[in-house]
Image: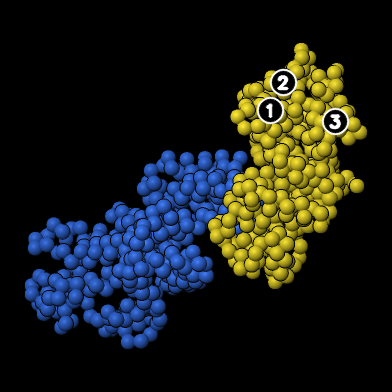
Chain colours: A blue, B yellow
Amino acid sequence: MLPPYLWSNLAVLLLFGAGVALGVYLRRNRLWREALSSLVRRRPLAIAALCLYVLVGLLDSVAWVGGPAAGADTVAAHEARSVIDRVFAGTPESSYSAPLATVSFYGAQPLESPRGHLLGTDILGRDVLYRTLKGARVALLIGGLTSLISIPLALLFGVGAGYFGGRLDDAVFFLISTLASMPSLLLLIALIMVMGRSTLSVCVALGITSWIGFARLARAETLKLRELDYVQAARALGVRDRRIVLRHILPNLAHLVVITLVLMFSGLVLSEVILAWLGIGVDGSWGQMIDQARDEFSRDPIIWWNISAAGGALFGLLLAVNFIGDALRDILDPRTLREDA
Amino acid sequence: MSTLLEARGLVTSYPGAAGRVRVVDGVSLSLEAGRVLALVGESGCGKSQTAFTLLRLVAKPGRIEAGSVRLEGRELIHLSVPQMRSVRGSGIAMIFQEPMTSLNPVLRVGAQVVEAIRLHERVGAASARQRTLELFGRVGIPDPSGRFDAYPHQLSGGLKQRVMIAMALSTHPKVLIADEPTTSLDVTIQAQILQLLRDLQRESETAILLITHDLGVVNELADRVAVMYGGRIVEEGPRVAVLGRPSHPYTQGLLRSMPGRVRPGQRLEEIPGVVPPPAEWPPGCRFATRCPRVRVSCAAEMPPEVALDADHRTFCFAVAEEGGG
């Protein structure tokens, strides 16, 4: 049995591997290769920003036991610590310190770390930059893992219902209507309560509540594709249903999958913030940082760096992803192609 | 010549507001090896539905209610689904009307033909590719190896139709159903495709069921002609007999409305009225509502079969009583 920190590290690495594999697969196809290079040309900054987030997430997922542990902390000596953990190893401060300050916020005592902290420290004296960087991994995990649960579910139900129709379609639509008639936030909370609070259960709960929209879209698109002549032609050639779905329906849904994946990602990361606000988020997420920092906002003088760091990191990631999603949609939809493209 | 495909009393129906409507009603056809049978009629007369019935590809909620389809004596109507699937393509293949949409836009055309070959035969990728290139050459695609990796949108309509024909031929079908293969092509390409079909049919012993509403195409290609109206065959016989001595009022009307027979400035004849929707077809002769020679019994009773020659038959009260006029 893998310890909990290991499986989530594994999940991040697997996600990254899957992303790279998808990229390599798409590059083999000329259409996608052109779309990707056009994307890089159009949104170099957004891509660079996303790569930075991914890099931080990866650095936080490569972990091993041993090496010089911080101080006399015996737990740290036996724990698998990531590259990020090791970089930021050091004695924690006693409490708040402002960004780049050399003395503590309350009392003006000299800090343990003589260089100060780029983004200050929080109430427990932890480095805010460190916590912010740790949040990247959580965000990528939530967005990526949940999409990996949600999109296959949506494709399975949507394409199945659209292609086979009849009873299956009725059953899937009953399920969709039932899920859609429940307030999704309540359903989310209930699911997380049932499964217990963990990164995986939050991802599964978000996955279960977020597939409906894309399933509807996939079903509608499949209904259209099913009647097209090349699907009829495949049937007239004696191709089996499974093969028709895999070879003739799914590849024609690929552009929708890519666009949905990117747009869904940002929505999911945001949902986690809302869950954190309700106290059922994932440990170490930006949502949790924001949640913990909300009281600090009403202090005087104001403690602004915690919420700003988490909010800024969240904003940067979502902005980059949304820019990429927008550009992808423009590239993949020939009707929106402009002269300069 | 031996009979390759024999269809008897096919009935296909769709649910309507007042019970099921028979869009194919008692159609019988027979195809001989190496011959072309043309199925002629206006839009909505059940030509394509007849083709889908032969392949058992009638889309839900449609249903084949009765009839028998025998391919080389083997009954297809009662075959299991997997058995029927193996007949499609290798026994009976089909070319569709719209070459523009009959190829999957995201796959290379060569790969689609290779898929068809490997579906029915255990051959390696390399030899399937080789076969595809040969087929491309045979159907007159210039630069086969260059076109192999092309996507459908990079090909013209005529080339796409040639790819479709190559795909249909790739499995060596005994019967080829061509559903208006030239309708969406321009006249020059039409002539080329017709020539191609004629050549291919001469080379192999493939029987072709040509579905069309273009009598010019029929005259070019067909050995026998079956005229359909309202889901039934109204006249059937050798091409020369049906086009030269049409006996059913509908066939006569069709031929009279051909533009070629009229001098400039003269008004083109037409068949009055339009094809009524299937739910409003009269129980007797379907053409009764538009027929110039209609009589009292026509709309109520099924017209009798009238044998005009050994292999030329028609279904009409007027012809039965007065002879062809």
Cα–Cα span, label 1 and label 3:
26 Å
Q: Position of residue B128 (x, y in %)?
A: 71, 67
Position of residue B163 relative to residue B247, above or below, is below
Query: Which three-letter amino acid code belongs to the residue tagged 3?
Result: Arg
Cα–Cα span, label 1 and label 2:
22 Å
Q: What subunit carries mark 3? A: B
Return the residue found at the far top: B296
Marks 2 & 3 on one chain: yes
Residue beneath label 2, please? B291
In the displayed structure, does residue A86 sit left or right of residue A5?
Answer: left
Name the residue located 50 percent from the left edge and 67 percent from the top edge: A30
Tag shown at residue B313: 3
Mark found first going from the N terminus, 1 or 3:
1
Residue sitting nearer the eye, B210 or B279: B210
Are there few (<14), some (14-19), or many (20+) residues within 10 Å of tag 3? Answer: many
Residue B114 visible within the image: yes
Tag shown at residue B204: none
| Badge nearest the viewer, 1 or 3 | 3
Q: What subunit carries mark 2? A: B
